[in-house]
Image (tube, grey):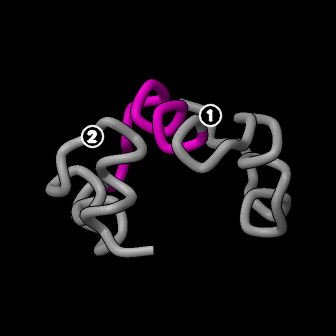
Amino acid sequence: MSINRLATVCALPPSSIKNILYGKSCNPKLLTIKMICDGLDMTLAEFFSSPEFDGLEQEIK
C-alpha cells in the first residue's frame, strides 16, 4: 500500500504517515496510531501485541 493510499484510508495527511515511517516522528500521538489502526482494520490491542513491542521495557520518568 502506498503512503498516499494509507493516508487516505486513515484520514491523515500523507506527511504524518511519512514522518512516522521515516522516523521523523519519534512519539506519535495515540490518536494518530488509533486512526492508522482504524484504517488498517485492526485494534490498538492487535497493534501493540506484536514482537516489536513485547521486548520493550517500560520507561520510568
Q: CA distance from mark 1 to mark 2?
A: 31 Å
Q: Position of residue 28 (x, y in %)?
A: 37, 42
Span of residues in magenta: 26-37
Q: Is residue 3 left or right of residue 32?
A: left
Residue at point 81%, 36% (across, down): 45
Within 10 Å of disc 1 (Cα), the crowding (few <14, some 14-19, many 20+) is few
Query: Does the magenta segment cover residue 29?
Result: yes
Q: Residue at x 71, y 35 (%)?
A: 44
Residue 12 rendering spot, x and y as whole percentages: 27, 40
Q: Is residue 43 above or below residue 47?
A: above
Please tell me which residue is depicted at 40% across the width and 41% down the height of the picture.
Answer: 10
Considering depth in this image, is 18 or 9 the residue closer to the camera?
9
User: Magenta region's main secondary structure?
Assistant: helix
Residue 26 vs residue 34, the one in the foreground: 34
Q: Is residue 43 above or below residue 4?
A: above
Helix, strand or loop at label 1? It is: loop
Which tag, 1 or 2, sits closer to the chain's start?
Answer: 2
Disc 1 to disc 2: CB gap under 8 Å? no
Quadrant housing residue 46:
top right
How many numbered discs sit on the rendered protein?
Answer: 2
In this rendering, the label closer to the viewer, 1 or 2: 2
Q: Which mark is residue 12?
A: 2
**What residue is disc 1 on?**
60
Amino acid type, callout 2: Leu
Does the segment drawn in magenta span residue 13?
Answer: no
